[in-house]
Each structure stands twice: as structure tokens, then as C-alpha cells.
Amino acid sequence: MEQIIQSSGAIGGIIHLPTSKSISNRALILNALSNSPYPVKNVSDCDDTRVMLEAFASKGNNFDIGAAGTSMRFLTAYLSQLEGIWTITGTERMKNRPIRILVEALRQLGAEIEYTEKEGFPPLRIHGKKLRGGQICLEGNVSSQYISALMMIAPVLSEGLQLELKGEIISQPYIRMTMQLMKTFGVDVVWQDSTISIVPQQYIPALYQVESDWSAASYWYEMTALSNNEPAIELTGLYKDSTQGDSRVALLFEQLGITTEFTDKGVVLKKGDLSTKRLVYDFINEPDLAQTLVVTCALLNIPFRFTGLQSLRIKETDRISALQNEMRKLGYIIKDESDSILEWQGERCQPEADPLIATYEDHRMAMAFAPAALVLGKIRIAEPGVVSKSYPRYWEDLKKMGFYI
């Protein structure tokens, strides 16, 4: 299946963003660990959160979480401390996303987990029980979801958790998000230098409402930057003091001439003059913004050098290769270095006459490339349904803004 997106280049209006799946999925785990009688309010309606809700509502022992990486990591840790025998699986892509680091860490804490197909990868069989806990050591450059998964179950371990992170610690905002949410549910976390310490504690039920998703907002920043008018776009439910690391998108796009005005409802985006000659940024803490900025900068003819992208190789797809492949279809030659850097200095090639953008089962590929219609007039997106992973109403919202689909 494919979808054609067309645009006159002009946009403007109000968008009610989806809520944050990163916050939603953490809050659901913490809500369960606290045995809360209250539902988490305003949870995301995306696939990743839906499978979490289905897992908690299920009375069975077998879970298929599809392509939801966050759900795989968080539920693996959660189920390992919950008495029972559980199996957890996912799509073919999920079966090729490594989980050995998390499984080995949980085993050190006393967990019993087996690989039912390929060593080091889902599906898993988990013999849930009360876990011992203790001291473990991980490289700081592993996925923050592994770290967050371990942190959230730490208070219910008999010895708690002392987690030492070696070397460079990536995606720190996601770790701090987990810390702040744990505090909301009554648990204190001490993070000093490279060590995270969590003593045995009891979670306290809390009334919690999820805020809108800054990652989803990034595509509207992109559209504002690529539009040929001076739109005023209002995005609801965003907070200036957000726990989400991707809120830095406002500062990034400020360099591309987009101003952010905070209101009591959210933010208003306005387009100003573009003065940046070259954009250099380290995405170590905000890797999910990389696709948005690669497409935006190239279409604005702004050279860039983006570092800190090492986690992109093991996301929903190999995002570094996917970006290179699809940008070449538009006539841009993006170079990579050391599996962690993407750079463009203006190199061009002959673009395809009617490019079809492959999405690689990756929601962010579809959402980052669709705004190119503002510059190109139209663009074709393969398998557009992938947006359901984080932003199910994405195409409807584009129609509201004047896109023809």
C-alpha cells in the first residue's frame, strides 16, 4: 500500500497532539507496581501503549507486543518479578532486535529467562518470581530503555539495585524522565556520578495524567520550517518544563528560524528569517529527532553534521541506512561515519522523478518524509499505516492543515 501526499506549501491551524508514549508506558508500569486503583489518565492511543494496556488487561500468560520496543523491554523486566510463567514475542523485526543485555542484567538480579528461538533475541519465556536484586554494571551507551526497565522494578527487589554505568551515558533525559515519574509514585532514586542507587521501597498509588508528545511536535516544527507561507501553528498540551528530552526540538528549530511561544494551552509556532548556514548537533540525548532534522535541513539546503546517532542502527529499522537510501531518492547524498554520524555538505545526485519513500516498518520514517510535500509538491509514502505506532491521527491532522492525501 502507498499514499500520495500533496500540498500547496501553505499550512496553519490548531493541532491536538497525541500524548507521550514514553511517559505513558513508564506510567503504566509504575501504576501496576504500585497496585494503584486509579487508571493513568490521557494515555497515548498509539500501538506501543495499546499493547501495554492489553497486556495488563489480559488474564493470560502469553503476550505479543508487535513492533513495540519499549513494551518489550519494560514488560520483560516487569514480568521477571511477577510470579508466574510468561512468554513474550513480537513481529519478525522485533525478533531481530537484541535484548541480551537486559536479559543478562535481569539474570544477575535473580531472574529466570529463556530464549525460545534465537539466542539473544525475543521471543522469551520468563519464570517470574521475587527477585534478589543487588549490584550490576552496564555500559552507559546501551539503550536507556534497558536502564529504565531495571530502575522501575528496583524498589520491589529484596536488595534494591545499585547500577553502575561505565563510559559515556547516552539518552540521559529518558533516564531522568524515569526518575521523575518514580518520584511521582513515591520512590526516591539517587544518581551520583555514574551510579544509580535505589533501595527497597514501596510504590504509592498516584493520580497521573500524561502530557502531549514532543517527538510528535517535531514534525509540525518541520512543516513550519518547510512551508512557503508564514503559518501560525498551535500545538496543544506541551509544557515548557517537560520531562521529555525531545522538548529540545524547540531550541533546535530556533536555529532554523522557528520561534516557540508558550501559552496556557501549549505552544504557538511562527516562522521567521533563516540565518543558519550550517547545523551541527550531538543527538546523543535526542536520537528520535534525527530523521526530522536530516530531512528538514536538506530540503532547506542547510549543510549539517549530526553526531551521537549510534542507537539509530538498532531502532525500528537501521535508521542510518534508511535515511541514506530514501534521501538519495530525493537527490541528496548523506554520508555516515563510525556508525554514529550523518553529514551532508551539499552533495547532490539525480532525484527520482516520482519517488516512493520506503518506511521500513518505522513510524518516524513516514512522518519525517511526508512534510517534503511542502517543497516537492507531492510525495509518495509506502505503508503509511506505520504511523499508528506513535501518532495514529497523523494523516488526519495533515488533512486538517490543508494537505491533500
Image (cartoon, rainbow, N blue to C red):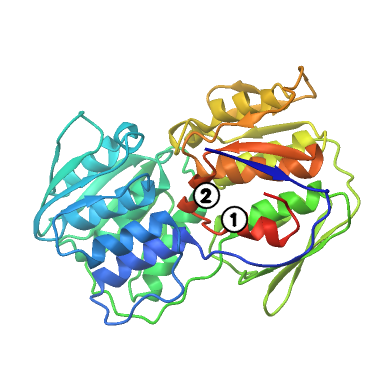
Percent x, y for residue 283?
60, 41
- Residue at image point 67% right, 56% down: 398
Percent x, y for residue 390?
49, 54
Residue 193 is left or right of residue 110, and the answer is right
The quarter holding residue 314 reads top left
The residues bearing labels 2 and 1 have C-alpha atoms spaced at a distance of 7 Å
In front here: 49 or 252?
49
Looking at the rendered structure, the secondary structure element under dot 2 is helix
In front here: 305 or 332?
332
Q: Which residue is mark 1?
A: 394
Q: Is residue 257 above or below residue 369?
A: below
Looking at the rendered structure, the secondary structure element under dot 1 is helix
For residue 387, the mark is: 2
- Residue at image point 34% right, 35% down: 97
Q: How packed is label 1: few (under 14 Cα within 10 Å), some, or many (20 or more)?
A: many
Q: Is residue 56 visible?
A: yes
Residue 77 is left or right of residue 247, and the answer is left
- Residue at image point 91% right, 51% down: 273
Q: How packed is label 2: few (under 14 Cα within 10 Å), some, or many (20 or more)?
A: many
Residue 351 is left or right of residue 74, and the answer is right
- Say whether disc 2 or disc 1 marks the residue closer to the N-terminus: 2
The amino acid sitting under disc 2 is Val
Percent x, y for residue 170?
49, 43
Percent x, y for residue 383?
52, 39
Marks 2 and 1: CB-CB under 8 Å?
yes
Q: Is residue 190 visible?
A: no
The amino acid sitting under disc 1 is Tyr
For residue 29, the mark is: none
